[in-house]
Image (tube, coloured by chain):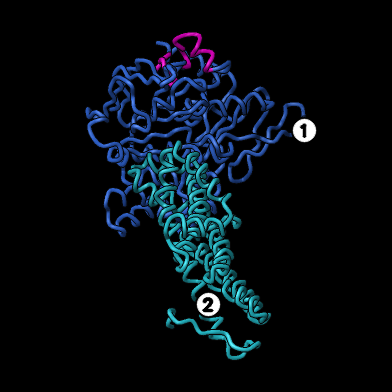
Chain colours: A blue, B cyan
Amino acid sequence: MIRFDSVTKRYGDGTVAVGDLTMELADAEITMLVGPSGCGKTTTLRMVNRMIEPTAGSIEIDGRNVMSLPAHELRRGIGYVIQQAGLFPHKRVLENVTTVPRLLGWDKHKAEARARELLELVGLSAAMATRFPSQLSGGQQQRVGVARALAADPPVLLMDEPFGAVDPIQRGQLQQELLRLQRELHKTIVFVTHDIDEAILLGDRICVLSTGATIEQLSTPQEMLARPANTFVADFLGQDRGLKLLSLVPADDVRVEEGTTANGWKLELDDDGRPVSWLGPDGEEPVPAVVVRPGDSARGLLDAAVSAPSRAAVRTDADGRLVGIVSYETIGALLAAKLAEAAS
Amino acid sequence: MNLARPPSWSGFSIDGNWDVVWYWTLVHLRITIIALVLGAVVAFPVGLAGYRWRRTYPVFLGVSNVLYTIPSLSLIVLLGLGFGLGLLNDMPLIVALAIYTLAILVRNLVEGLRAVPEPVTDAATGVGYTPLRRLLRVELPLALPAIFAGLRVAAVSTISLVSVGGVLGRGGLGYLFFEGYRRNRPTEIVAGIIASIVLAVVVDLVLVFSRRAMTPWIRVRAAR
């Protein structure tokens, strides 16, 4: 557990970046620090590994004050991932990943074996190990950054807008992989972002901060979307809170309906049971069926439903075979139920 | 080779005088290397101080600009007479050249260290490098291209300036220019000129290849 106790950071010019912050971040959870630029979220993160030292107050990790040991020793025990990865350009990928184990005094073979394991874990092929960072794409560099942070198996991971500089497609992949890694590793992750969608997607808890790192709300994404604490949080979450709430519901959890007909349109399947197109009641031109695969969310179902002539979404399994259809009305009822559930 | 007893040039042809050219080439190289090493040894702590304590750097720049404006021959004489280094040995020449080397290398060292990208130094600190280790393992290696660029300029300019010492009867291959001129032996002058050009090119190539060998990550940059 990471505990902030009345933490203040005041700069020489009088600016208060963080003013009297008290909070507890739970173990094995991803806590997203989110807020407008200049709200103090990065300062808050960087005080955990003493890249910035607090003016007042204390920070404890598992009951141990971060000031109780030399800064470099503290940092070797905390994973640190930053924007643009911050890889060492003169070191090959493998050497980048072995940095912390080597600083901790592991022997070379053990450190390299561990590094290879991690490269595989973050989805990089063994051939990447001997490359220099400049030979990798932005997304690959960021994977190496994550591998480097995990190399010595620290319980805590600090991530400062790690996916901010990669393109949207790679960002989406990196986000999914972070979630996959977290299901295996159960780290205590503090993650700074200014992107509320990223916060909702990744966070077990979201901490919305305003100027001076004032906590506006610290709660689960579901609760925050259903019941924002104040207008600041509501504004920050944006207009489409209901849709965002749906994005938290796995499509697989939504009950499918009997049959393959909705509003008079019939779903045509091929010989393997894969949806092909919607056939209209009055001999209209067939409309290709858009399918929702496992791993997508109820938001994807809603989108598929409103864009289909039948007003129903088509759910398939990983091989593309039909699981069932979900009507627009079912999704609407689901949203209402989720809102009520989160608000209770 | 015995550097204490210079062979002397005889006649008007290069034939029979190769040992003279070789002798002065070695003297030239020796003065160059001593001046470069001396300059580098002083430049290193001065440059690190200029990087670490930002305010010391402008002071250094001011002093080095003043020194740089003193013509080389004046500086050599000044060092020889004014500072008692004497004019009948290589010391004033070596010290003057070391000062020029120092001025060039400190700039390149400081600029090279300052050019290390901030995410890289931030990450190095964040993963637990101590400041000294970070300097040795991350910042200095990344400043190597700039350091070598400075070394090349310093080496080539030092090799050309060594010849100035020829006016005073010293200065490696410069001796051949001045003696050849005095005794009206064009071949001796040409031999001195060609030898100093060859020496400059060879030293420069050695530095270029050393830099490439020491910074393998640079060449791959374009290969993405």
Q: Is residue A112 left or right of residue A259?
A: left
Look at the image and give the residue range highlighted in magenta.
A213-237
| Residue A153 position by quadrant | top left
Q: Residue at x 73, y 26 (%)?
A: A281
Query: Going 63% across and 43% down the picture, which residue do you hit?
Result: A270
Marking on residue B67: none
Please rate how many residues cluster around mark 2, counting C-alpha atoms within 10 Å: few if below 14, some from 14 to 19, many from 20. many
Q: Chain of mark 2?
A: B
Amino acid type indicated by mark 1? Glu
Residue A162 rendering spot, x and y as whole percentages: 47, 36
Residue sitting at the far top:
A230
Expressed as whole percent of the image width and height from the top left, the position of residue A262 reads 63, 25
Is A216 within the magenta?
yes
Q: Tell me the distance, in whole angstroms, between the alpha carbons under discs 1 and 2.
A: 95 Å
Would you name the residue on which mark 2 appears? B24
Using the rendered image of the protein, determine whether residue B217 is visible from the camera's viewpoint. Answer: no
Asked whether B125 or B200 is in front, the reply is: B200
In terms of depth relative to the viewer, which is nearer, A316 or A60?
A60
Does dot 2 land on a helix, a strand or a loop? helix
Residue B177: x %, y % from top left: 62, 74
Chain of the residue under the numbered disc 1 shown in the image: A
Which of label 1 and label 2 is nearer to you?
2
Residue A341 x, y percent position in the rendering: 42, 14
Residue A226 visible, this orientation: yes
Q: Quadrant of the C terminus of chain A?
A: top left
In the displayed structure, B165 sits above or below A187; it is below
Q: Is residue B208 magenta?
A: no
Q: Which residue is mark 1?
A: A285
Judge the density around disc 1: few (<14), some (14-19), many (≥20) Cα neighbours within 10 Å: few
Kindly state the secondary structure of the residue where label 1 is placed. Answer: loop
Asked if residue A155 is positioned above or below residue A205 in the image, the reply reads below
